[in-house]
Amino acid sequence: MKVTIIGTGYVGLVSGVCLAAKGHQVTCVDIRQDIVSCLNAGNPHIYEAGLSELLTQVIESGDFEATTDLTTALDRVDTIIVAVGTPSDGGVIDLSYVRTAVRKIGEYLKNNDRYISIIIKSTVIAGTTDTVVREEIETASGKYHPAFGLGMNPEFLREGEAIDDFMNPDRIVLGYEDPETLERLEALYAPWHVDKVRVNTRTAELIKYANNSLLATQISAANEIANFAAALGNIDIMDVINGVSLDRRWNPILRDGTRLNPAILNYLIPGCGFGGSCFPKDIQALHSQGQELGLTMDITKAVLNVNDVQPLQVANIINSHIKELSNYKILILGLAFKPGTDDVRESASLKIIDSLLKQGATIFAHDPIAATNFSNAMGTEARKITITSEWRHHINDTDIIVIVTKWPEYIDLENINLSGKIIFDTRRMLSIEKVTGAQYFAIGLRQS
Ligand code: UGA
């Protein structure tokens, strides 16, 4: 099947490359010529494990092409996926990129008498496709739905695991407003033999928000319990999580009688809060939309409140042992919001470093791939810290080491003599018994 995708960000590009790898002929459209040129040369402009190799493969097979020429890309297909960004604008999502993209499709339809299905893949609040999107296309084309088709196909991929998540999804949600569009969605996802959920577009939109919101709620709840464990003392939150996560409702007994290892059970692991471009933005957008509907949205508010202050637990715990940090050198390990990505949006590292700088600490920071993005995100404040590419060289003249992102290389700390140092492990990466000589601190663990 031939498909055109508008937008080559995380969702657009990964979807395009993976659909092409499954045998569809994909044209990705972006307004930026530099991005299009890079993509056609096999160089993705975003970092994602395995993406570069798969892009090269689908270019070579002739199934993928990028272009800035929207009209030609629309001429080729009868199914268009819109995957442009929906950034947060003061807590509500900014739909301007979606509006612009679908208006252009409407203008095209005005002069072309064909039935085209427009499928929204961007994360948009419930009701957007069957109101905002429909109205924009109707106004620009002068045609009324169902003279064109409307669909909504949310994406559940995680940064760092994007290719695997797209290729092996838990389910695929097919939101549609007309039978032709459902048929095209079915054809697009025919190569995937997984559960498919067929619903109207606003249900599809809410499934995406509900999914992220419930996962984020679980993380904030685990963080609150972790802070409780530390306050009461003589409890290690990881023992609590281990005990909880053996409950079959979280960790079903598999067909072969085994279970998942609770240590890898996600979304129950406490830390310094959830970051990234999705959870914080989506929970906030759900909250704002609920309030507009006259609801109090108490739970989403609490989830955001817990998350806002969770990174500050690091400074609080350090301060409970050292009141004055101005003479201390602190090495921050990890700047990305999670391993496997160079994305620093809403990363806990930003808040942690800010609060330590305010107390006059001297900061060294390392990340294997996110250092440049971090410096850009910090702006002029970045001048106050020293970014290093060789974190091991700084261990000797550092007083406090804080692990913020669970990059695998930091496990080496277990093999380094850390006598006299303080280690703050916000991700529970190290085995306490293997940390030699250092005082060990963590979220959800109080040491006397
Ligand atoms: C998230 C969702 O997991 C995806 O399903 C969704 O498609 C995506 O948002 C999106 O809406 O586009 P992502 O933001 O890439 O994916 O990252 P996650 O791996 O889910 O992690 C989010 C944050 O939660 C990270 O800061 C992570 O460190 C934190 N987290 C995760 C915890 O603190 N504890 C956990 O147990 C799990």
Image (spheres, grey):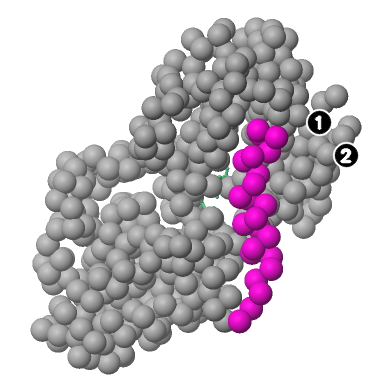
Query: In percent of the image, x 28 and y 54: which residue is there?
Result: 8
Dividing the picture into quarters, in which one does residue 90 lie?
Answer: bottom left
Q: Quadrant of residue 343?
A: top left
Amino acid type of the residue that numbered disc 1 sits on in the rendered structure: Arg
Q: Which residues are magenta?
A: 294-316
- Residue at left offset 59%, top offset 29%: 359
Q: Nearer the viewer, residue 142 or 40?
A: 142
Q: Secondary structure at mark 1?
A: loop
Report the number of numbered marks.
2
Determine which residue is flagged by label 1: 446
Is residue 383 among the parts visible in the rendering? yes
Q: Which mark is residue 232?
A: 2
Question: Few, some or many C-alpha atoms within 10 Å of disc 1 (few <14, some 14-19, many ≥20)?
Answer: some
Is residue 397 placed above or below 204 in the rendered structure?
A: above
Given contact means CB atoms under 8 Å apart, are the residues at marks 2 and 1 in contact?
Answer: yes
Q: Which quarter of the figure has residue 370?
A: top left
Say if 326 sits above or below 242 in the image. Answer: above
Residue in front for this viewpoint, 182 or 334? 334
Q: Position of residue 98 (x, y in %)?
A: 31, 69
* Residue type highlighted by circle 2: Leu
Q: Main secondary structure of the magenta part?
A: helix
